[in-house]
Amino acid sequence: MFRPVLAATVLICLSLPAAAETYKKVKTDAGGALFETSCMRCHSVDADKASYGPLLNGVVGRRAGTYKGYPYSEALKAAGFVWTPGALRAWMEDNDKFVPGTKMRHVGIEDPTVQDFIVTYLTSLN
C-alpha cells in the first residue's frame, strides 16, 4: 500500500522543478502578450525601436527617472526609488498616486494577476 504512494510522491517531487520552469515560461509569455496590448503603444523593450516612453528593457533594478536621453518629469527624476517588482505594480495600478506630478497618463492596471505577469515579463528582460 505504501510503495505506490511513495512512488507517486517521488514522481511528483521530481517533476516539480520542470513544472515550476514551465509555469515561469507561461507567465513570462503571457506577460509579454499583456505588455504588447497594455504598454507597447508607448514603450519598447528593443533599443532599436523608438518609442514615446523610455525603454523598459532592464527597468527592474533601474533607478526611476534615469534612462539616458528620456525627458522625465521633475517629479519622477526626484522620486529617488528603484524599480522593484512592488514599485512597478504600484506604478501600473495608479502612477499619479504613486508619483504625483508625473507626466505619464494611462488607464490603471488594477488586476494583480495582470500586474504580476507583466512584471514577470519585464524581469525576464534584465
Image (cartoon, helix red, strand yellow):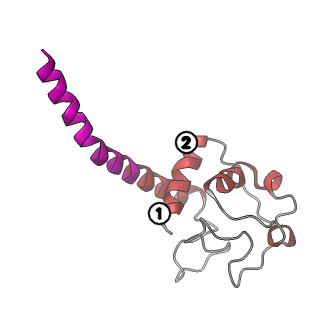
Stretch of the chain drawn in magenta: 1-25
Q: Nearer the viewer, residue 5 or 58?
A: 5
Q: Provide residue 51's location: percent of width, then percent of height.
A: 62, 75
Q: Nearer the viewer, residue 125 or 34?
A: 125
Residue holding disc 1: 124
**Lateral position of residue 27 relative to residue 99, left or right:** left
Mark on residue 113? 2
Q: Nearer the viewer, residue 78 or 56?
A: 78
Mark on residue 62? none
- Residue at 59% x, 56% y is 38
Mark 2 and mark 1 in contact (Cβ < 8 Å)? no
Badge nearest the viewer, 1 or 2 = 1
Label 2 crowd (10 A; few <14 / some 14-19 / many >=20): few
- Residue at 81% x, 55% y is 96
Label 1 residue SS = helix
Q: Nearer the viewer, residue 54 or 84?
A: 84
* Figure check: 3 above or below 45: above
Q: Provide residue 63's location: percent of width, then percent of height.
A: 70, 70
Looking at numbered disc 2 in the image, what kind of residue is underneath it?
Thr
* Figure check: 53 above or below 18: below
* Figure check: 47 above or below 4: below
Q: Considering the whole magenta stretch, tell me its main secondary structure.
A: helix
Label 1 crowd (10 A; few <14 / some 14-19 / many >=20): some
Indicate which disc, 1 or 2, sits on the residue closer to the N terminus. 2
* Figure check: 87 above or below 13: below
